[in-house]
Amino acid sequence: MLISTSSYAQYTILLNFAGTTNGESPHGDLISDGTFFYGMTYEGGTNDIGTIFKIMHDGTGYAKLLDFTGATNGMYPSGSLISDGTFLYGMTKWGGSNGNGNIFKIMPDGTGFIQLFEFALNVNGGYPLGSLISDGTFLYGMTQNGGTNTGGTIFKIMPDGTGFVKIFDFSSGISGNGPKGSLTFDGTFLYGMTELGGTNNLGTIFKIMPDGTGYSKLLDFAGATNGSLPYGSLIYDGTFLYGMTLLGGINDFGTIFKIMPDGTGYSNLLDFAGTSNGRYPLGSLISDGTFLYGATTLGGTNSYGTIFKIMPDGTNFEKLLDLVFLTGAYPWGSLFSDGTFLYGLTEQGGTSGGKGVLFKYSPEALDIDELLMNNNELLVYPNPASDNFTISINAVMKNAQVEICNVFGEKVYSTVLNNKQETINTKQFSSGIYFVKVSDGEKLFTKKLILE
């Protein structure tokens, strides 16, 4: 198993999902109020049918807000939560009194749960997999099945549970069917994708007005040429819509693409290739204003998925990380960025029976190998070390802070380097690879350390 140490040192597990106590197998994304992350797990919890949770950005303060119970409040949530500043809103794939899923809201402290709507399959849809969005007045969403043509629906509903309207019924060969992602709103149109249906039965891209009028199919996916079976959602940068497909492209491992909101200007930005850059993306892209970031569920060096970035014009693709089962495998949803770190969820892997993890990762990971070759400002010796090792700094630094991190990115030791040199006993550490970082807020030096 190969691990890129320069990337892996910047990866930290914030939570190992463990089943009954805190859920397992998350399928959606994280949202944040600036203090807490909020999310859901597809399984686990007291009833093994999913949970709602919150956790601080540093991995502390975990709280299970809700155990799903089935008929009374839903089961197996597959999408993500959204917030209006007061309530969190979400959907479950199954459960409710009809067994077809529901729409709910809950307070961020776990109180005030209200089931807003229960889907009734052939009447208004069922089994939603994506998330809700809001235009400030209505909540909008899609179901993957049900409705008049059994191919899924688009709907809107008020945040208090009133005013539900089914605004569109998908029809397989014409408009597509089986949407598995969420809608995107540009202020005028709602945009989305279907996993199946359309001319080639490989999925479609569409737009529609919030009142259900003005439906237009923007693209029929065709397989090798432009991808097939899109699973996630579109994002919009004011000019182009960007998205990914689960399959298709020249390797049938999925694609990254962009398209204009009027359906013109389609461009295939990347064909996933498996080991080299990943395969089968199930989530959506995010943007930091410069790069697009995403994850693949499989592929990469270790076959457990990848994290990557790419420019909006398709250039400068970089595989940032090959995931490793012990620290999280098979990312299902999308990444979240706080401007410094990327955060995400994996469906499997971790150290609690492989039930998934919540992680953070620095996309600006230091190139440790380059630093090792070119920097003599920081010395760590002997290396490898057995009993003691010495940290010595040659650069001019004020109040130099020393941190030693393990390969999981966890800080295991810290001190202040008062005399530009310090000898540390190895008895407090386990054998393995560590990274020694010395910083004064302006300069940062890093060395890899091997303890025998």
Image: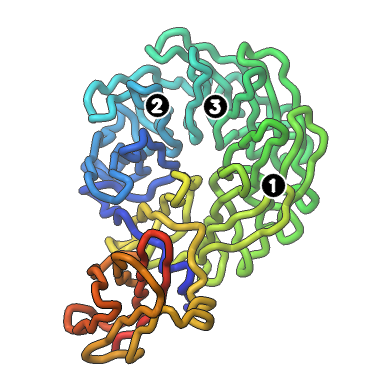
Q: Amino acid at mark 3?
A: Met
Sequence order check: which comes first, mark 1 or mark 3? 3
Against 192, residue 313 (above or below) is below
**Left or right of 278 in this view: 391:** left
Residue drawn at the location 72% of the way across and 52% of the way down: 314
Against 223, residue 67 (above or below) is above
Q: Residues within 10 Å of mark 3 (few under 14, many from 20)?
A: many
Report which residue position mark 3 lands on: 142
Q: Is residue 123 visible?
A: no
The answer for how far apart the CA atoms under marks 1 and 3 are is 27 Å
Instruction: Check whether the beta carbons of the residues at disc 1 and disc 3 lie within 8 A of each other.
Output: no
Residue drawn at the location 49% of the way across and 67% of the way down: 366
Q: Position of residue 7 (x, y in %)?
A: 48, 67
Which element type, helix, strand or loop, lies under badge 1? loop
Q: Residues within 10 Å of mark 2 (few under 14, many from 20)?
A: many
Report which residue position mark 1 lands on: 312
- Place residue 63 in its image quadrant: top left
Against 164, residue 34 (above or below) is below
- Place residue 415 in its image quadrant: bottom left
Residue drawn at the location 44% of the way across and 42% of the way down: 29
**Left or right of 297 in this view: 90:** left
Which element type, helix, strand or loop, lies under badge 2? strand
Q: Which mark is residue 83?
A: 2
Q: Amino acid at mark 1?
A: Pro
